């Protein structure tokens, strides 16, 4: 794994060549008024973490007892009954790779609110946590959310508990788990996750006629692919009895920066969504379509020759995946305060790796610094450095949150812009990386702050330029997600947005099993392979997301879905595009999805 870490760093370094001069961004705009706020939404919408007891069996039964529960966020009208069958429509949502249920915290709450306020309807949204999320110890995050108000105390609790081994209230963090400690994840694959979807819908809405009438199933990124798997799944394994098939238990399907696809098209699509090469996992790159390859990969997990999670210890680790929630929790206590936690984060290879990757201007900076810890950023801007498309290198994190403000900036990694313009290759670069035009602060004395999406540009002043007005950093058409809404979703409630322990078995099932005829021989009950053709469906494709470049190359099959191109949106924007700033931006996802449900429900 250490070897891979340095190989990846070298590859990044090749792309981080020198760039031109500096430019200082103009002052922030005033921002736009909000049509409603979070308090208004919370007065209408109930958000609870629901759990359904469903004990694991076989090898998986060795997991901690807490993993015997399926959990999901349930968002519904406060005045609605507890019986989901009474709802006008229900949306079951599956997250993407490395995502938890909070990926749908913003869009779900807004959908419930808008459905009631604008249409007088009571809908529900259920955001699923995959089983492996049970392994995350969120004690200190939940404590800080409930009881801490100062950034100093928040930092003391979070860094002490998670990164310094300090007990809190007589509770001690047992550490971030390694692959060796997780043998039971061998069985945390597509079969378990899909059966959990069935358990949720059958428990919450027992009557199949209700599910056929008003239950809509979908997801983001890999969750869209998983929706295709769900539609094809036959729960009892008997394809002649179709009442238990996924497609026979839903009124329609949807995908958020994802596609609803024939199962044999899955491998090439998923390859565009993961932030690493399959070779990193020790998996063969050829002959994927054989039963022997599938069994070999599963045996690799059992022996731990193939890591049981898709993280790697000296780079994109579970500890790194916990950092965004810590940064978000600190940002809420004082968004405009300097991030003193920068200097106090652990000096570990994985933490240093992610900080270097996010804040390196060129090859010389990578080798000699200054590194991220030497800069001064506000706590809110730290969140954006990880996720905003103008700063985060990884496309699967891309969100359109605004831009840095307050000091000199320079363009970083301009070679990516050059590669983007090359025929064919540029499409794949677009699918992996975020913005063609990325920037970085250049002055270690300046306190850089964050200009929100509506503080950088507006319909009347659509470009965010330097003080001279000549250099354009970003524009109104490509900024639409509120940093405060996004920060909230990273930390709020009993679950979170980033997934610390994403099971490799899901990827093995997706690459080596589900697309091929032997799938049903190895317990993957996808008997109805053309099921995507059997239900109404809608796809929301980010104009700057992971799918559009592949669509432009003609690599995405047309299965008759209503396809909505979301101009300017990155990979995470479909869930976070602002819904309550109509004078500034019209959300093209929420009302369209609600209208889709109204057109295709039958009750």
Image (cartoon, rainbow, N blue to C red):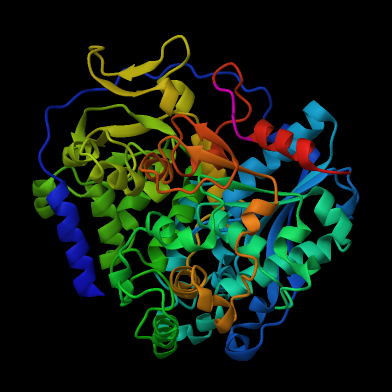
Q: Quadrant of residue 212?
A: bottom right
Q: Quadrant of residue 426?
A: top left
Q: Which residue: 75% across, 40% down? A: 597
Q: Which residues are magenta?
A: 585-589
Above or below residue 501? Residue 432 is above
Position of 530 with respect to 178 (left or right) is right
| Residue 147 makes an appearance in the image | no
Q: Position of residue 595 (x, y in %)?
A: 73, 33
Above or below residue 148? Residue 421 is above
Position of the C terminus by quadrant: top right
Q: What residue occupies the far top of the structure in this picture? A: 460
Q: Which residue: 55% across, 63% down? A: 140
Above or below residue 36? Residue 300 is below
Task: Give the prevailing secondary structure in the magenta stretch.
Answer: loop
Q: What residue occupies the far front of the structure in this picture? A: 240
Position of 50 with respect to 186 (left or right) is right
Above or below residue 196? Residue 588 is above
Q: Quadrant of residue 321?
A: bottom left
Comparing 414 with 268, the one in front is 268
**Is residue 549 inside the magenta stretch?**
no
Q: Which residue: 61% across, 34% down? A: 589
Q: Position of residue 462 (x, y in %)?
A: 41, 15
Comparing 241 with 368, the one in front is 241
Position of the N terminus by quadrant: bottom left
Q: Position of residue 237 (x, y in %)?
A: 70, 78
């Amino acid at each position: 794994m250490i070897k891979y870490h340095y190989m990846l760093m070298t590859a990044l370094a090749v792309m981080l060549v020198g760039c031109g001069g500096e430019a200082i961004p103009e002052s922030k705009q005033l921002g736009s008024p909000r049509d409603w706020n979070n308090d208004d939404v919370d007065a209408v919408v109930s958000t609870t973490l629901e759990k359904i007891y469903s004990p694991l069996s076989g090898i998986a039964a060795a997991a901690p007892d807490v993993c015997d529960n399926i959990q999901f966020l349930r968002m519904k009208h406060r005045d609605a009954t507890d019986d989901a069958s009474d709802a006008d429509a229900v949306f079951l949502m599956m997250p993407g790779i490395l995502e938890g249920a909070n990926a749908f915290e913003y869009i779900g709450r807004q959908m419930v609110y808008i459905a009631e306020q604008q249409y007088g309807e009571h809908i529900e949204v259920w955001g699923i946590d995959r089983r492996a999320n049970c392994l995350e110890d969120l004690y200190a995050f939940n404590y800080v959310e409930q009881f801490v108000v100062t950034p100093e105390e928040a930092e003391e609790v979070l860094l002490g508990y998670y990164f310094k081994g300090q007990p809190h209230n007589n509770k001690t963090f047992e550490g971030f788990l390694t692959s060796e400690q997780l043998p039971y994840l061998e069985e945390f694959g597509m079969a378990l996750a899909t059966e959990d979807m069935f358990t949720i819908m059958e428990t919450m809405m027992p009557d199949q006629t209700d599910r056929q009438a008003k239950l809509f199933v979908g997801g983001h990124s890999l969750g869209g692919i998983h929706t295709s798997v769900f539609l094809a799944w036959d729960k009892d394994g008997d394809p002649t009895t179709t009442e238990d098939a996924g497609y026979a238990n839903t009124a329609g399907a949807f995908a958020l920066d994802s596609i609803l696809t024939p199962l044999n098209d899955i491998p090439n699509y998923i390859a565009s969504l993961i932030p690493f090469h399959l070779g990193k996992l020790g998996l063969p790159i050829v002959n994927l379509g054989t039963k022997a390859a599938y069994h070999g990969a599963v045996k690799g997990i059992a022996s731990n020759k193939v890591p049981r999670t898709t993280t790697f210890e000296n780079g994109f680790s579970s500890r790194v995946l916990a950092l965004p929630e810590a940064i978000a929790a600190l940002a809420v206590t004082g968004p405009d305060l300097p991030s003193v936690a920068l200097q106090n984060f652990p000096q570990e290879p994985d933490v240093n790796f992610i900080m270097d990757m996010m804040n390196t201007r060129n090859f010389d900076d990578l080798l000699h610094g200054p590194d991220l810890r030497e800069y001064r950023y506000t706590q809110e801007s730290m969140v954006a450095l990880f996720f905003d498309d103008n700063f985060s290198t990884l496309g699967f994190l891309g969100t359109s949150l605004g831009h840095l403000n307050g000091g000199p900036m320079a363009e970083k990694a301009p070679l990516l812009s050059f590669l983007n313009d090359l025929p064919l290759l540029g499409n794949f670069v677009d699918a992996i990386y975020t913005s063609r035009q990325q920037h970085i602060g250049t002055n270690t004395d300046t306190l850089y702050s964050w200009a929100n999406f509506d503080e950088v540009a507006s319909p009347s002043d659509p470009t965010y330029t330097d003080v001279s007005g000549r250099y354009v950093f970003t524009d109104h058409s490509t900024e639409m997600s509120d940093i405060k809404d996004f920060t909230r979703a990273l930390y709020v409630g009993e679950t979170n947005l980033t997934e610390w322990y994403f099971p490799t078995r899901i990827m093995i099932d997706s690459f080596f099993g589900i697309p091929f005829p032997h799938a049903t021989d190895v317990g993957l009950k996808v008997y109805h392979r053309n099921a995507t053709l059997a239900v109404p469906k809608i796809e929301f494709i980010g104009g700057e997301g992971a799918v559009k470049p592949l669509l432009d190359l003609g690599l995405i099959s047309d299965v008759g879905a209503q396809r909505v191109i979301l101009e300017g949106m990155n990979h995470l924007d479909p869930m976070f595009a602002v819904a309550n700033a109509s004078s500034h931006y019209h959300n093209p996802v929420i009302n369209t999805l609600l209208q889709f449900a109204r057109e295709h429900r039958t009750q």
